[in-house]
Image: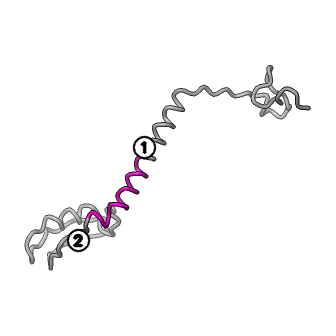
């Protein structure tokens, strides 16, 4: 079943349900993976609206998270595109060798 909107009903069922306009309207028979379905509109409820002052902090938080994710994704793409990766095989082959010039695994000058 094509789950949708965190609902146990699939998108096709929800789409058909939202097409019903008047109390008592009945949908055509819908063929689903698990059988058939018929929808009848029994009642309507009004929408739930909240004042902006009540939701502004939550909206700002969601926007910050979204922007942060976007910036992180852009950074990762740019870092991959512009970075050069050098792999020193000797550092990983168990011989304990490090590349000439020391590489990333050498000790800084002046340390034993």
The CA distance from mark 2 to mark 1 is 30 Å
**Horizontally, is 4 left or right of 20 in the view?**
right
Name which quarter of the figure residue 36 lies in.
bottom left
How would you rate the neighbour count of disc 2 (Cα within 10 Å): few for under 14, some for 14-19, many for 20 or more? few
Marks 2 & 1, CB-CB < 8 Å contact: no
Assign the N terminus to one quadrant of the image. bottom left
How would you rate the neighbour count of disc 1 (Cα within 10 Å): few for under 14, some for 14-19, many for 20 or more? few
Principal secondary structure, stretch drawn in magenta: helix
In this rendering, the answer to whether 92 lies above or below 66 is: above
Of label 2 and label 1, which has the lower sequence position? 2
Q: Which residues are magenta?
A: 52-67
Image disc number at residue 70: 1
Name the residue carrying label 2. 48
Assign the C terminus to one quadrant of the image. top right
Residue 93, image x, y percentages: 80, 32
**Horizontally, is 14 left or right of 88 in the view?**
left
- Extreme-top residue of the structure: 100
Q: Is residue 78 visible?
A: yes
Name which quarter of the figure residue 19 lies in.
bottom left
For image coordinates 33% across by 69% down, the residue present is 8
């Amino acid at each position: 079943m094509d789950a949708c909107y965190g609902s146990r009903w699939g998108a096709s069922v929800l789409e058909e349900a939202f097409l019903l306009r008047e109390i008592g309207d009945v949908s055509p028979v819908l063929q689903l993976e698990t059988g058939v379905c018929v929808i009848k509109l029994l009642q309507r409820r009004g929408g739930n609206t909240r004042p902006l002052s009540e939701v502004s902090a939550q909206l700002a938080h969601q926007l910050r998270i979204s922007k942060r994710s976007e910036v992180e994704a852009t950074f990762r793409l740019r870092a991959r595109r512009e970075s050069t990766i050098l792999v020193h095989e000797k550092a990983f082959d168990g011989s304990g060798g490090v590349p000439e010039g020391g590489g990333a695994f050498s000790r800084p000058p002046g340390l034993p």
